[in-house]
Amino acid sequence: MGNLPKKSLMVFITTLLALTGFSSGAFAEETTFKDVKEYTSFYEEIMFLHGEEIIFGYEDDTFRPTEGVTRAAASAMIGRALGLDGTKRDSSFKDVPEQSFASGYIASAVEEGIINGYNDGTFRPNQLVTRGEMAIFISRAFDLTTDTEAVFQDTAPTMASFEAIQNVYDNGIAKGFSDYHFYPYKTITRGEFSAFLARGVEDSFKQPVEDVKAVEIKLAVDKDNNLTLTSHLNGEVIHANPLQPIRIITSTEGDKPSFKYAGGVLRSIDYGSYYASRGLGVGEITAGLKGDPITIPVTYIPNTAENQKPINGYVTELASHKIMTSCPMSLNGSTAQDVMDYYGTEPDSEGYLGGGYGRTYGQCTYYSESDTDLTKKIVTIDFMNEDDSVTAPAFKKIVGTPDWEGISELDGYWTQLYRLDGMELYASYFDKGSPLHTLRLKHK
């Protein structure tokens, strides 16, 4: 190949076919596999690559899209896509003889630094390729780069395939699964490999992607070892999409703080001050040094229309961690001053109500024990609901069976009570058949 870019020959072939009036798509339509139909996953990508003579089927006219891909087959497919020399020849591997169908492509792929052998002098041509290995091969083959910080919930910077997985994600080649996992150790199928390879060759097959950046939490430590949170307020909930990692940035003149994490949705990664998501729901990071520790509540909620509703399937889990997702401040030590600083304006209304002295901002009311002492902690949060579709039966179906429900003696509202760890969550309705009026989260 000399110094030619790896895709030069592929681009030349495609251009030549267009100039001669010979459509690769037309070729694909005339050639079919018995087990590849229009409803088959990745049908278009499979037929495109077959039309370009990058992939082939078996003698029985099947393609076997659900079978695994061997390292030899992967080398051959990538080699054809890039126009590498596939002439059969001796290789440096003791388990790849010259007569192997892929010997030339294996040798070329190794020369190009796309696929490597093993320390024992073998290539293991019949070993099946995993999704993580696929990411490495494709990333090297097409010289992929990225500036995304997306972290799947089963990947970590300590993995050999981590950067390659980020590359294929950000370049629209592999998006992962709907549960925010990439499954790097899962064997890749011939159909999947065809899809990823086609997306590397032809931009029109690429998948839309969302730019993902880490959520940064900034802390400051002064020379007296006083720890302060500078990017967020105490008790403010850090909302992150499931692919967003969290980066702790500490500007320090004194000692370095220690960190703990809890709640099941965070995992520590030995990658500087860097945390990645592990599961959906809520957790917290606690930074400790001199004086009281700083607790930072974190939620990982799928960024879908269903889960952006005020009431969703995570409500009791979030509430049990002193968080109401519809209101940005939590009960994790927030004070009345914190709330006022967060919103930066005077309350829409304020006064003594059933939960103490309340300050209302939009749909959220925060209650403390005093109207003058702003250092008092928030003990109750009310959220005023405006979604008419949420009725008492619907709320119960979404959240689960309450510990108690009936007419409240305090205000005559139909009320559902959920007792949580140190917390209580109340759902109130004007009557049993009317829409949800208020959600109340309070310390017991």
Image (cartoon, grey):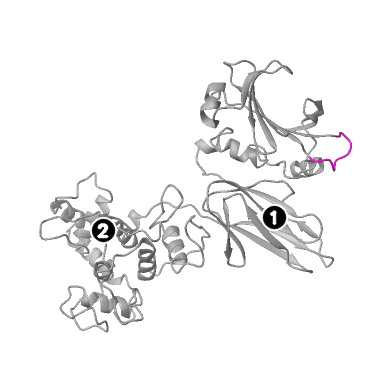
Asked if the residue at tag 1 contacts the one at tag 2, i.e. Cβ–Cβ closer than 8 Å, the answer is no
Give the residue drawn at x 42%, y 67%.
144
Bounds of the magenta segment:
370-377
Q: What element carries label 1?
A: strand
Residue 393 in sight here = yes
Question: Is residue 376 within the magenta segment?
Answer: yes
Spot occupied by residue 308 in the image (x, y as percentages of width and height): 55, 38
Quote the CA–CA distance across marks 2 and 1.
Answer: 45 Å
Count residues near mark 1 (Cα–Cα under 10 Å), then give few for <14, some for 14-19, many for 20+.
some
Say whether residue 96 is left or right of residue 192: left
Q: What element carries label 2?
A: helix
Instruction: Name the residue nearer the viewer: 422 or 246.
Output: 422
Spot occupied by residue 174 in the image (x, y as percentages of width and height): 39, 56
Placement of 331 over or under 144, stated as above or below? above
Residue 325 in sight here = no
Give the residue drawn at x 59%, y 17%.
434
- Give the residue at mark 2: 190
Q: Of the numbered discs in the image, which one, if any, rests on residue 193?
A: none
Spot occupied by residue 33 in the image (x, y as percentages of width and height): 15, 53
Residue type highlighted by circle 2: Arg
Say whether residue 347 is left or right of residue 204: right
Residue type highlighted by circle 1: Thr
Q: Mark 2 or mark 1: which comes first in sequence?
A: 2
Q: Of the numbered discs in the image, which one, if any, rests on residue 286?
A: 1
